Structures are given as structure tokens and as C-alpha cells.
Image: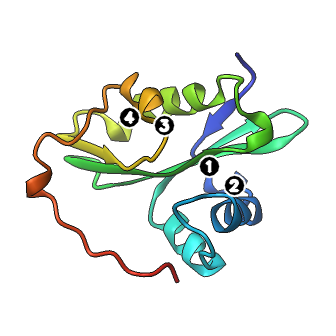
Amino acid sequence: MGGLRVNTDRGELDVPLIHRFLSTGAYWSPGVARETVERAIAGSLCFGGYLDGTGQVAFARVITDAATFAYLADVFVLPEHRGRGHSRQLMDAIVAHPQLQGLRRFMLATLDAHGLYAHYGFVPVARPERLMEIVAPIP
């Protein structure tokens, strides 16, 4: 494990790479429009993961008020860079970020990474009957 450099500098993000992965490689956002990805990045605290000599290989964003609530979204490590501890390094940086301390609620949705997130204290929703949502097609 090692080598992943994580920061929140939006200017360093490889937006074409992020859009390509989210629109073609992510089960949660197939076909998402580039404009939608750009708007999501603009409205979020974004984390890029970079390897020297390779560029960006990981991404996550957090939607937050930086006081009481946060939602973790669009977390990925490119397939060819998985299995090297990069997801843990990315999550270490996210949970340590100063704007994400002292929150009452930090949420996420996942189909297949429960073990990763459980390591950071995420648990299934205690009272799902309290949650509601509006689900719209991906633009």
C-alpha cells in the first residue's frame, strides 16, 4: 500500500476521466451527461487520488453543509489500480478532512463496498422508515 496522493484541488481533477468512468464504468450513473458531472463537482467537496507518473486514478465527492450533514458519492478507483489499498487511502483522507468533523450524520449508498465503509464506522440505516427519496432518470 502506498503512493496515492489525495487532495481537494478541483483544478487538478481530470474531469474527462471522471466523466468517462461515471458514464460508462459505474453501475450508479450509466450515461450521465458531462454537464451533470461538472455541476456535481462544482457543488461538492471533491477528492482526487493521484499516482506519480500515472495521474488521477481515484475520485470521490462529498455533498455537505460542513456542519451537520454529509453524503459521500461517486467513489471509485479505476479498475486497473484496485487491490492496492487506494480506496482505504482515499477514505482515510475523506474522514480526516477538517470540514467533515463533528457531523451529526454522514451517509452513503453502496451495492458492493459495505466492508470498506464499515471500517470507517458506516452502518446500515437504523430506521429506514424515516428515509424518503425521489428517484429521477439520470440526465
What SS does tag 3 mark?
A: loop
Q: Are marks 2 and 1 in contact (CB under 8 Å)?
A: yes
Give the Cα separation between the discs numbered 3 and 2.
Answer: 24 Å
Question: Which of 98/118 is in front?
Answer: 118
Front tag of 4 and 2: 2
Q: Which mark is residue 122?
A: none
Judge the density around disc 2: few (<14), some (14-19), many (≥20) Cα neighbours within 10 Å: many
The image's mark for residue 98 is 4
Q: Which residue is mark 3?
A: 113
Is there CB contact under 8 Å for labels 4 and 2? no
Q: Amino acid at mark 4?
A: Pro
The mark lying in front, picked from 4 and 3, is 3
Residue type indicated by callout 3: Ala
Mark 4 or mark 2, which has the lower sequence index?
2
Residue, disc 1: 9
The mark nearer the N terminus, 1 or 3, is 1
72 versus 139 height, above or below:
above
Q: Within 10 Å of the Cα at label 4, are there few (<14), some (14-19), or many (20+) other Cα atoms?
A: few
| Image coords of residue 130 (percent x, y) | 8, 56
Q: Which residue is mark 2?
A: 13
Upstream in sequence: badge 3 or badge 2: 2
Q: Secondary structure at mark 4?
A: helix
- Residue 100: image location, x then y, percent: 34, 39
The location of residue 12, given as percent across then percent down, is 71, 52
Q: Residue shown at 10%/46% (left/top)?
A: 127
| Kind of residue sitting beneath label 1 | Asp
Label 1: how many residues lie within 10 Å, few (<14), some (14-19) or many (20+)?
few
